C-alpha cells in the first residue's frame, strides 16, 4: 500500500502557516511593525507649570498632547509619571480618571504633580551649587491605553534643562 505524500505535505504547510498566523496575530509589536492592528498614540509633553506654592508643598501641572492615529477611540487605563533631577525624584503623580482620544484625533490632558517637600531644599541647594549651569530634568511617563483588541503600553522619556522644563 502506497501512502500519498502530497496531502501530508499540504497539511504540514497549512499547520505551519496557521501557527505563524496565530503567533503574529497575538503580537501587538509585530502588528504595529507591519502596519496592521492598533498603532501607538503619540504623546508629547507640552509644558510643566507651577500651579501653587506653600510652605508645605509645591503643586505642578503636566500638560500633554495625545494624538490617536487609529480609526477607533482610545481610552486611558492608567498613567504614572515622575520628574527626576540631580539623582532624585522631585515630583510624581498618577492618573486613572476617564480620558479618551477620539479616532484620528488629538486631545489634551493636564495632570497633577506633587513635589516631594523634602527634596525641594536639596534641589534648591543643587541649583545654587551649579552656579548658572543648567540642571537636566527627566520626565518619565508610563501609560496604558485601552483599545478594542486589548491594552497598549506607551512609555515616554523626555529630557530637557530644568529651566525650560518648568514654566513659572
Image (cartoon, rainbow, N blue to C red):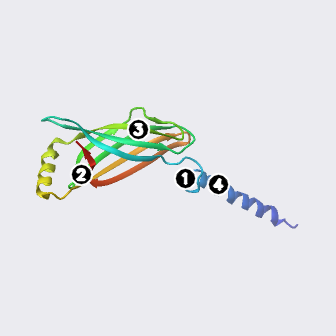
- The residue identified by callout 4 is 21
SS class, disc 4: helix
Q: In the rendering, which numbered label is found on residue 151?
A: none
Mark 4 and mark 2: Cα distance apart in space: 48 Å
SS class, disc 2: helix
Q: Which residue, as the protein is rendered here, is positioned at the far right?
A: 1
Q: Find residue 92 and report its horizontal and vertical position in percent.
A: 27, 43
Depth order, front residue of 12/3: 12
Q: Which residue, as the protein is rendered here, is positioned at the far top?
A: 98
**In the image, which is nearer the foreground, mark 3 or mark 1?**
3
Q: Residues within 10 Å of mark 4 (few under 14, many from 20)?
A: few
Q: Are marks 4 and 1 in contact (CB under 8 Å)?
A: no
For marks 3 and 1, the one nearer the N-term is 1
**In the image, which is nearer the foreground, mark 4 or mark 1?**
1
Mark 3 and mark 2: Cα distance apart in space: 22 Å
SS class, disc 1: helix
For marks 1 and 2, the one nearer the N-term is 1
Q: Are marks 1 and 2 in contact (CB under 8 Å)?
A: no
Residue 55 lies left or right of residue 39; in this view the side is left
In the displayed structure, would residue 120 be above or below residue 56? below
- The residue identified by callout 3 is 108
Residue 15 lies left or right of residue 147; in this view the side is right
SS class, disc 3: strand
Q: Residue at x 23, y 53 (%)?
A: 85
Q: Are marks 4 and 2 in contact (CB under 8 Å)?
A: no
Mark 1 and mark 2: Cα distance apart in space: 34 Å
Mark 3 and mark 1: Cα distance apart in space: 24 Å
- The residue identified by callout 1 is 32
Q: Residues within 10 Å of mark 2 (few under 14, many from 20)?
A: some
- The residue identified by callout 2 is 162
Q: Residue at x 70, y 57 (%)?
A: 15
Amino acid at each position: 500500500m502506497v501512502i500519498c505524500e502530497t496531502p501530508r505535505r499540504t497539511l504540514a504547510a497549512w499547520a505551519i502557516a496557521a501557527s505563524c498566523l496565530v503567533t503574529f496575530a497575538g503580537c501587538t509589536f509585530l502588528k504595529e511593525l507591519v502596519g496592521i492592528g492598533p498603532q501607538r498614540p503619540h504623546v508629547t509633553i507640552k509644558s510643566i507649570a507651577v500651579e501653587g506654592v506653600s510652605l508645605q508643598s509645591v503643586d505642578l501641572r503636566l500638560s500633554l498632547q495625545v494624538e490617536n492615529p487609529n480609526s477607533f477611540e482610545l481610552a486611558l487605563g492608567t498613567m504614572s509619571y515622575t520628574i527626576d533631577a540631580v539623582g532624585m525624584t522631585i515630583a510624581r503623580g498618577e492618573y486613572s480618571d476617564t480620558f479618551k482620544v477620539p479616532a484620528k484625533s488629538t486631545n489634551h490632558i493636564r495632570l497633577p504633580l506633587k513635589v516631594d517637600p523634602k527634596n525641594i531644599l536639596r534641589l534648591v541647594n543643587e541649583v545654587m551649587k551649579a552656579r548658572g549651569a543648567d540642571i537636566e530634568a527627566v520626565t518619565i511617563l508610563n501609560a496604558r491605553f485601552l483599545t478594542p483588541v486589548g491594552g497598549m503600553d506607551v512609555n515616554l522619556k523626555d529630557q530637557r534643562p530644568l529651566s525650560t522644563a518648568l514654566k513659572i
